[in-house]
Image: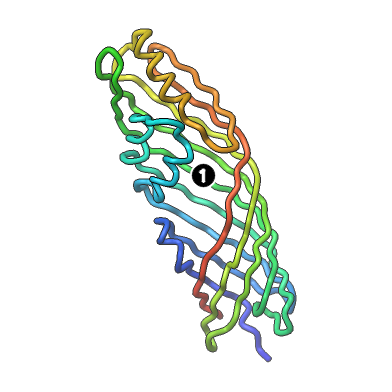
């Protein structure tokens, strides 16, 4: 039996979260294959804004709400994995487990936001975050015909660490009252499982973030075999 050992896949569910993702898989033998995934989200407003706002803001916070509503975000991720097929068929078919590593980079594109103190102040905000995670994907893959397959990512929880920063540059020198107000806005952000360090001066502010990073891989992929 001739085995088509190469699979190029498009993640059909990724666009729901404004992502576009491809994967290449190479079948090495009946039980083992290797795969490399790439994902990109072009600059756009963040998906699931309401859910994220409820998670990261303790009280009403106009500045952070404006960031989530107006600022554009982008990201990309690269994920190598080793697949172990456990079913009877193998050769890229059946149930599999796949340990993986993911490198991800998230960018907050610069935007000008305003807040109130003794008067209205404007701050140019931008930032980035880098994440490293490892996990285990459970899935199943089967052929739909001679050249088509369907890959179901059932669940792929991962955990790791991340670090990044948010920088705000003021449009004018900030007096003490305006600095205190900006500091209050930033300290009101509660990023789950992260340590936040906030510094504010007359020129603006900086928030450094370090901590755990977790996620889960799920999806339905259409594969072309050759």
Q: Quadrant of the C terminus?
A: bottom right
Q: Residues within 10 Å of mark 1 (few under 14, many from 20)?
A: some
Question: Is 109 located above or below residue 79 in the figure?
Answer: above
Task: Say which residue label 1 marks.
Answer: 105
Q: Residue furthest left?
A: 119
- Looking at the rendered structure, the secondary structure element under dot 1 is strand
Across and down, in percent, residue 177 comes to 36, 10
Q: Residue at x 53, y 33 (%)?
A: 164
Q: Quadrant of residue 117?
A: top left
Across and down, in percent, residue 62 comes to 33, 30
Q: Residue at x 58, y 55 (%)?
A: 216
Q: Residue furthest top?
A: 176
Across and down, in percent, residue 208 comes to 53, 27
Q: Quadrant of residue 65?
A: top left
Across and down, in percent, residue 122 comes to 29, 23
Question: Is 85 located above or below residue 197 in the figure?
Answer: below
Viewer-nearest residue: 24 or 179: 179
Q: Residue at x 67, y 66 (%)?
A: 34
Viewer-nearest residue: 31 or 189: 189
Question: Is 64 located above or below residue 72 in the figure?
Answer: above
Question: Is 201 located above or below residue 33 in the figure?
Answer: above
Colour pattern = rainbow
Q: Quadrant of the N terminus?
A: bottom right
Q: How many marks?
A: 1
């Amino acid at each position: 039996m001739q085995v088509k050992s190469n699979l190029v896949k498009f993640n059909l569910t990724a666009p729901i979260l404004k992502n576009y993702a491809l994967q290449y898989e190479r079948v090495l033998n009946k039980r083992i294959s290797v795969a490399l995934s790439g994902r990109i989200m072009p600059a756009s407003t963040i998906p699931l804004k309401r859910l994220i706002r409820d998670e990261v803001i303790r009280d009403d916070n106009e500045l952070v709400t404006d960031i989530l509503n107006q600022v554009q975000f982008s990201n990309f991720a690269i994920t190598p994995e080793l697949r172990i097929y456990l079913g009877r068929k193998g050769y890229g078919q059946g149930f599999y487990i796949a340990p993986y590593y993911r490198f991800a980079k998230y960018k907050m594109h610069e935007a000008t936001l305003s807040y109130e103190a003794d008067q209205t102040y404007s701050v140019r905000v931008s930032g980035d975050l880098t994440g490293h995670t490892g996990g285990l994907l459970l899935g199943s893959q089967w052929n739909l015909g001679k050249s088509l397959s369907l890959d179901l990512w059932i669940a792929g929880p991962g955990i790791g660490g991340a670090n990044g920063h948010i920088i705000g540059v003021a449009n004018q020198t900030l007096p003490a009252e305006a600095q205190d107000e900006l500091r209050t806005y930033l300290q009101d952000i509660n990023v789950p499982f992260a340590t936040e360090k906030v510094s504010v001066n007359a020129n603006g502010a900086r928030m450094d973030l370090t901590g755990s990073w977790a996620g889960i891989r799920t999806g339905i992929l259409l594969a072309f075999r050759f």
